[in-house]
Amino acid sequence: MGNYFSELGENVISAKQERVRELTQRALADGVDPVEIINSGLIPGMNVVGARFKAGDMFVPEVLMSARAMNAGMELVKPLLVGKEVPSQGKVVLGTVKGDLHDIGKNLVSMMLESAGYTVINLGVDVSAAKFLQAVKENKPDILGMSALLTTTMLGMKDVIELLKEEGLRDQVKVVIGGAPISQEFAREIGADGFAPDAGSATELCHQLVAR
Amino acid sequence: MFMGGNEGGSYRPLTQQEIEMLHKASMLVFEEVGMEVHSRRALEIFAAAGAEVDFPNRRVRADESWVMNLVKKAPSQVKLCGREEKHDLALGGKKVYLGTGGTALNVLDLESGRRRASTLADVRRTARLVDALENIHFFVLPVYPSDLAKENVDVNRFFAGMSHTGKHVMGGVYTQEGVRKVIRMAEAIAGGKEALRRRPFISMITNIMSPLKMDGTYTDLMLTVMEEGIPLATPPAPIAGATSPVTLAGTMVQLNVEALSGLLLAQLVNPGMPVLYSAVPTTADMRTMGFLFGAVENGIMNAAAAQLAQYYHLPLYATAGVTEAKIPDVQSGYEKMSTSLLVALAGGNYIHDAAGLLESGLTVAYEQYVLDDEINGMVVRAVRGMEVDKETLSLDVIKRVGPGGNYIVDDQTYQYMRTEFFLPNVADRSPRALWESNGGLDGREKARRIARKLLAEHEVSPIDQAVVTALQTEMPELIVD
């Protein structure tokens, strides 16, 4: 059975989607515990990918392709987990603030978070404070992430945080922000819990905040 | 990933008509002015071959048909090998390679940053550093070992180079005895006289003096190398406005005569021998008449030299990537990049001086090799240009992704991401917050750290110990380390 796990991990690392699907099917047919397939096969492979990315040896598209390979296995395993909890790092609501239509950076963060095991609810672009609030109420995320590329729209982040305070929800969710004009200083000024300068750091920031 | 040997040729400062105008003017200089040759042997060789030689005035003149007849006999391709085959250079056409140059007298100490006289240890260490840097394709011995007596310099400089890099080693030479010993040494390492001629992993440089003069000592050194049939560069280094006409075109006319002279002599001494059309056209700052190595005009002239070499079907030894800056700084960055880019885009074959040199060629710095490796990497990438075919046009991919999608996780991105882009080692591309948390280093400090790491960790493919021991017995002056 150990063979399945190391081979699954290796194929997640090398992003062999078909091979991961095949191995997962065979492992399940052999009676391997679905939770073990995730925890001892797929996730450890993805952890290696994360470490290599951090060292600069793997690139963003490779990380995302590995995540896609991992998900090919996950899709087969998930339906069998009735009554058991699907392992997740946490839930994140993401969006680009009102008046701002830039979304490649935010989508990249979304993909990187998903690849690291988070459940992401992506609200898209031009998201109003009211819409952020509604999403927090409905999904009860661990983390709310906001993105802005323009110095004129970044102030909208403060409005969202103020609204969360008014509704008494501010202490139930961690708020993280990012985008080209954003700095740690600005995050502190508007009362966000964290700032990440790029997509790789965003994942690490979420790990830290969720662990607290 | 981006090795040398890509084809340049897109930058052409001269039109076809202008190339022919330069050629015709040079031929008139050959015929009416000629070269002054301060070597009895060389004068006799020119005379025996039918050139018009004025012995009392040591003047050699020749007409166009005589010159061109010999030019046609010179090889249009020259292979300069590495001690390791993966570093072989195929010179000719518009293929581009970049490497180091010399000969500097000083080095900026890697630890103190202070300028000091260079030593034999610096030859070894620069060789090892260059061996580790993939965008420096060959090793011209870069510094003079101030710690050695002149008669021991040739042998020890070349041995230090050959034993500390697997790349091609070229160097200036100082004594006839030294030239012969260096060649004997290389033959022993190659496995015999023929083996070295088949795979010449060393080559030599002997200079021609501008304007229009072949010096006695240098020409005798030149003749020795020619008789041995070891690949040779015979560069003249005219300074526009000082030792050649102030105009770039005039300097090129004179340089062409000088460059062809060395090449012709080689073909007379040893027909078919590997020799490079060699060019070091330079300028002076007219405000002071100070010599300039990093001027943009030097880049333009070297690019023109590439066009002339291509016109004659001769492989080119060109010059670029030099600077007047005293330390690795902004000036060294833009001066080096501008000339290297111009000459490489023109298809210069063997672009020397393009790594490590500062202060008009008087000083080298270890971190500068790391910085120039990066400049060269960008230059080589620019030479490679853009591949356009059915696959790279990406029609299917654009249809697949569609409006509003993204290409980050497309298979094509995955397939091309490591080969489509040059990835720098030194340049900082991170957001400010990450740059700050990593120490907020500037390029020079980062390059210093990379140089230290490579010098500590990089291993060079060694020369057979039995060969080294035998050489030590034969040449007691040989310093092995």
Image (tube, rainbow, N blue to C red):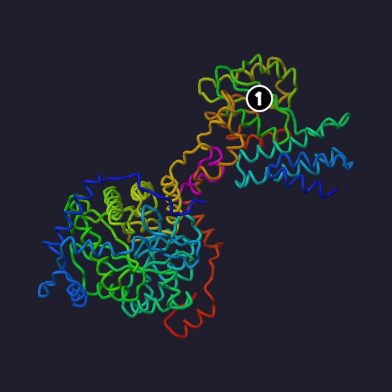
Give the overall secondary structure of the magenta segment.
loop
Query: Residue B148 lies in what quarter of the image?
Result: bottom left
Asked if residue A194 lies left or right of residue B143, the reply is right
Q: Tell whether position B434 is magenta.
A: yes
Q: In the rendered view, would you say B453 is above or below A75?
A: below
Q: Residue B455: x percent and y percent?
A: 52, 62
Asked if residue B57 lies left or right of residue A29, the reply is left
Q: How many marks?
A: 1
Q: Give the range drawn in magenta.
A: B425-444
Q: How crowded is mark 1: few (under 14 residues within 10 Å), some or many (20 or more)?
A: many
**B182 and B395: which is toward the camera:** B395
Picture residue at 64% right of the left edge, 18% below the top: A162
Picture residue at 42% right of the left edge, 55% below the top: B368
Q: Name the residue under label 1.
A: A94
Asked if residue B175 lies left or right of residue A143, the reply is left
Q: What element carries label 1?
A: strand
Provide the chain ID for the residue under circle 1. Answer: A
Q: Tell whether position B20 is magenta.
A: no
The residue type indicated by label 1 comes to Leu
Q: Residue B113: x percent and y percent?
A: 42, 58
Picture residue at 17% right of the left edge, 66% below the top: B35
Q: Residue A176: x percent and y percent?
A: 64, 28
- Does any portion of residue B445 appear in the rendered image? yes
Q: In the rendered view, would you say A61 is above or below A189?
A: below
Asked if residue B21 lies left or right of residue B105, the reply is left
Q: In the rendered view, would you say B329 is above or below A73?
A: below
**B40 and B452: which is toward the camera:** B40
Q: Residue B63: x percent and y percent?
A: 15, 62
- Does any portion of residue A212 appear in the rendered image? no
